[in-house]
């Protein structure tokens, strides 16, 4: 089962479900929020899929119209954006360390950079046995729900940015239960979107480079993530394909298990505040910047995988010029 959130033509929120064999989503009765469905499922002791099925289904939705009219929402959100935590991890995928290392330095292999050291730590200790805690991964904060762009929405290239590059990733989507329980609602394809040129100047700029908008969806996969997730990443320019790469994810292609990534995110008690939503990006396997691509306003990012249904699409637009921020002395 996969879930979407959208607005009807009259602006009313709805949840749609795609079940096995269905070509179009059907409206989930008496539901306007996947978050509320997840909390209901936990309170009742049922799975999310069983809870959705218990609500029942209404009419089918014209999916193409939702896309063309830009009425899609991200598949999990919070009514108060400040109660959504966006975070990310890196150096989790085979190949990503090589790309990151190339951005930082060309040191000889016997003199490993911090990136390569961390990647090696993940290979050696990122998939601990059942009940064990493995090595912690690279981690960064990315903002709250106000930094989220819906599918088909525009992603901003800020005036202070050096670059705006896609990062095609699988994201884990979570809600915190009434007693602080971490509830994994499902997974979505995402564009973590970062400033790779800024990071390349100095690795200590990583935190700055990640404070950018992002997008995920349009569909939320309910249930287990396949061991291998394959897809395609594209940049369209002037109506044609400008660059493309392969999306390869899933635990079979990662040096950390999802469970280990979750452990080191949610071990912080303040990340287990009841009712909050968490969107956790698991890392990219391919980046256009590694191929020397420089994006520009007007480019369109497309990320797709059969595992997640429809394509995640966002257009890059120019933001306001960088100007001094006035500070008022009180």
Image: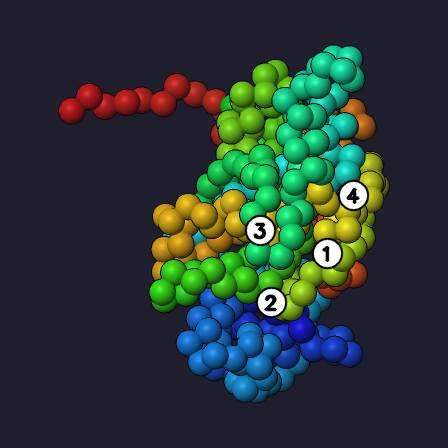
Label 3 element class: loop
Q: Is residue 227 visible?
A: yes
Q: CA distance from mark 4 to mark 2?
A: 23 Å
Q: CA distance from mark 3 to mark 4?
A: 38 Å
x and y percentages locating residue 197 in the rendered image: 64, 22
- Local packing at callout 4 (Cα closer than 10 Å; few below 14, some 14-19, many 20+) is many
Q: Which residue bears the numbered disc 2?
A: 4
Q: Which residue bears the numbered disc 1?
A: 311
Q: Which residue bears the numbered disc 4?
A: 234
x and y percentages locating residue 189 in the rendered image: 67, 53
Relative side of 290 to 150, left or right:
right
Label 4 element class: strand
x and y percentages locating residue 124 in the rendered image: 70, 37
Which badge, 4 or 2, is on the more N-terminal residue?
Answer: 2
Along the line of sight, the residue nearer the viewer: 81 or 69 = 81
Which badge, 3 or 4, is on the more N-terminal residue?
Answer: 3
Residue 132 image label: 3
Name the front one of labels 3 and 4. Answer: 3
- Picture quadrant where residue 172 is located: bottom right
Label 2 element class: strand
Residue 57 image label: none
Q: Are the residues at dot 3 and dot 4 in contact (C-beta closer than 8 Å)? A: no
Quarter occupied by the N terminus: bottom right
């Amino acid at each position: 089962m996969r879930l979407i959130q959208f607005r009807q033509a009259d602006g009313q929120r709805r949840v749609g479900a795609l079940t096995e064999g269905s070509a179009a989503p059907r409206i989930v009765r008496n539901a306007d929020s996947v978050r509320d469905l997840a909390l209901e499922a936990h309170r009742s002791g049922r799975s999310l899929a069983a809870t959705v099925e218990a609500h029942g289904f209404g009419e089918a939705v014209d999916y193409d119209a939702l896309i063309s009219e830009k009425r899609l929402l991200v598949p999990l959100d919070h009514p108060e954006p400040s109660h959504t935590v966006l975070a990310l991890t890196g150096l989790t995928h085979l190949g990503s360390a090589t790309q990151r290392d190339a951005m930082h330095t060309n040191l000889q292999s016997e003199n490993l950079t911090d990136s390569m050291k961390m990647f090696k730590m993940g290979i050696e200790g990122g998939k601990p046995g059942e009940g064990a805690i493995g090595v912690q991964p690279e981690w960064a904060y990315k903002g709250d729900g106000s930094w989220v762009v819906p599918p088909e929405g525009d992603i901003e290239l800020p005036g202070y940015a050096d670059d705006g590059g896609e990062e095609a990733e699988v994201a884990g989507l979570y809600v915190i239960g009434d007693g602080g329980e971490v509830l994994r609602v499902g997974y979505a394809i995402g564009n973590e979107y970062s400033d790779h040129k800024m990071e390349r100047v100095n690795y200590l700029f990583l935190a700055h480079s990640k404070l950018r908008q992002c997008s995920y969806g349009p569909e939320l996969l309910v249930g287990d993530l396949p061991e291998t997730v394959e897809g395609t990443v594209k940049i369209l320019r002037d109506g044609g394909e400008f660059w493309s790469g392969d999306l390869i994810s899933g635990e079979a292609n990662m040096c950390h298990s999802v469970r280990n990534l979750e452990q080191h995110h949610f071990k912080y008690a303040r990340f287990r505040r009841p009712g909050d939503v968490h969107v956790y990006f698991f890392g990219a396997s391919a980046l256009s910047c590694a191929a020397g691509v420089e994006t520009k306003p007007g480019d369109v990012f497309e990320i797709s995988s059969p595992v997640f249904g429809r394509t995640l699409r966002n257009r890059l637009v120019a933001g306001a010029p960088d100007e001094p921020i006035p500070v008022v002395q009180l």
